[in-house]
Image (spheres, helix red, strand yellow):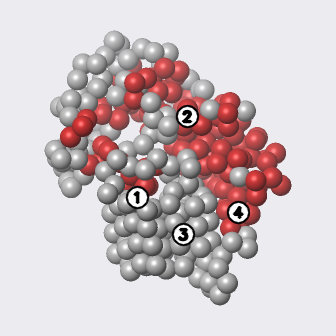
Amino acid sequence: MSTINNMHNLRADCEKCFALCCVGLHFTASVDFAADKVAGTPCTNLQTDYRCGIHKGLREKGYKGCTVFECFGAGQKVSQVTFKGVSWRENPKLAKEMFDVFPIMQELHEILSYLTEAWTNQETFSIHKELSHAIEEAEQLTMLSPNLLLKLSIPEHRAKMNILLMKTSELIRKDKSSKGNKKLDRSRADLLGANLRGADLKGVNFRGAYLIAADLRNADMRYTDLIGVDFRDANLSGADLTGAIFLTQFQINAAKGDSCTKLPPTIIRPGHWI
């Protein structure tokens, strides 16, 4: 399976993208973005070579949101495969369609990332065949023409794939929780600003939970299900996320951490961490 053998295809490669996130997406002036930007309009910092003019100083200049964003490789897929290397600058008539397709491809690649992670885990051997079929199906969808991609029902596809991802979570977390840990299901929990410093959270299901600005310093988060968790400004300094499942680079980029934070091998330690 090509996706399983090429995990790097599910990471952003800006050199092969026509800066779709810098043009197609809408930004609102906030703590994450220094100014408003309408979808379909190039960011004022975008250069003619599709590079960012302030890339090295994004955070200092008020564009923290740009350093957090991760497209799961959708940018280069849309640029080089879906539109065959023809940019919105070369053919302005393609611009709107290209920008509309981008977020759809991003969601498909995110789903592919989760499915691939599930397949590569030894605890999911019993459902490998189902996962293989799901990966092939998702890959085929990413190869559709622009007009067919725009007709896709992403919520329907996500719901279908989520059944497999939940099975994955149960298989991986089985018997992983610490003895006496009774609060295993914290899915969709509102833990905004919660004090969980040093907490034993091993094997907990945090699917869709809000952990914005939570204090998770030195917490044991091994084998936790973190799909859809909002980690914005959460403090993960010293936390152990070894074996955590469905953790994305996007989530880690949005959090705070340090050199003592233990991460899964597929996650890159952000440059802005202490």
Q: Quadrant of residue 66?
A: top left
Q: Quadrant of the N terminus?
A: top right
Q: Quadrant of the C terminus?
A: bottom left
- C-alpha separation, residue under disc 3 versus residue under disc 2: 25 Å
Say if 10 sits above or below 30 in the image.
above
| Disc 2 secondary structure class | helix
- C-alpha separation, residue under disc 2 versus residue under disc 4: 23 Å
Q: Amino acid at mark 4?
A: Ile
| Disc 3 secondary structure class | loop
Q: Residues within 10 Å of mark 4 (few under 14, many from 20)?
A: many
- C-alpha separation, residue under disc 4 versus residue under disc 1: 26 Å
Q: What residue is disc 3 on? A: 221
166 left or right of 126 in image: left
The residue under the point 26% across, 49% down is 64
Q: Amino acid at mark 2?
A: His
Q: What residue is disc 1 on? A: 259
Q: Quadrant of residue 255?
A: bottom left
Is 265 or 203 nearer to us in this picture? Answer: 265
Mark before the other along the chain sequence, 1 or 2: 2
Mark before the other along the chain sequence, 4 or 3: 4
Mark before the other along the chain sequence, 3 or 2: 2
Mark before the other along the chain sequence, 4 or 1: 4
